[in-house]
Image: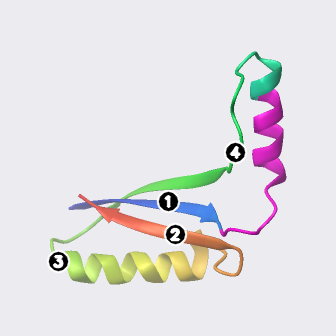
Amino acid sequence: MIKARVTVTLKNGVLDPQGKAIEGALGSLGFEGVHQVRQGKVFDLDVDGTDRTKAEAELKAMCEKLLANTVIENYTIAID
């Protein structure tokens, strides 16, 4: 079994209204000095097998087809 984490974030230059809302909420809660909040998503996956190269290729295909909107999002894959 291979454990992997996929992190998806918005590309630079893409507006992030949810990040802006979080930034405002943090300020309202008294957390001063927080700027440029960007939100994203994290996927933890267990992939059958032991071949890391094959798993990485499959994970990349998953990102390209479903997990990330590659027009506006970047992704990184970390395999344990």
Q: Find residue 30 and report its horizontal and vertical position in percent.
A: 75, 15
Q: Is residue 26 visible?
A: yes
Q: Earlier in the sequence, mark 3 or mark 4?
A: 4
Residue at image position (81%, 45%) is 20
The dot on residue 37 is: 4
- Could you tell which of marks 2 and 3 lies nearer the N-terminus? 3
| Magenta region, residue range | 11-25
Q: Badge 3: few (under 14), some or many (20 or more) residues near its Cα, within 10 Å? A: few
Rounded to the nearest whole Å, what is the CA distance between mark 1 and mark 4?
16 Å
Mark 3, residue position: 51
* Element carrying mark 2: strand
- Residue at figure coordinates x 79%, y 25% from the top left: 27
Q: Which mark is residue 7?
A: 1
Q: Earlier in the sequence, mark 1 or mark 3?
A: 1
The residue type indicated by label 4 comes to: Val
Residue on which disc 2 sits = 75
Is label 1 in contact with label 3 (beta carbons under 8 Å)? no
The amino acid marked with disc number 1 is: Thr
Question: Marks 4/2: CA distance?
Answer: 17 Å
CA–CA distance between discs 2 and 3? 21 Å
Q: Give SS at disc 1.
A: strand
Residue at left offset 72%, top offset 23%: 32
At 67% from the left and 50% from the top, the residue drawn is 39
Residue at the extreme front of the image, as rendered: 33
Q: Nearer the viewer, residue 25 or 30?
A: 30
- CA–CA distance between discs 1 and 3? 21 Å
Residue 34 at x, y percent in the picture:
69, 33
Residue 77, position in %: x, y?
A: 39, 67
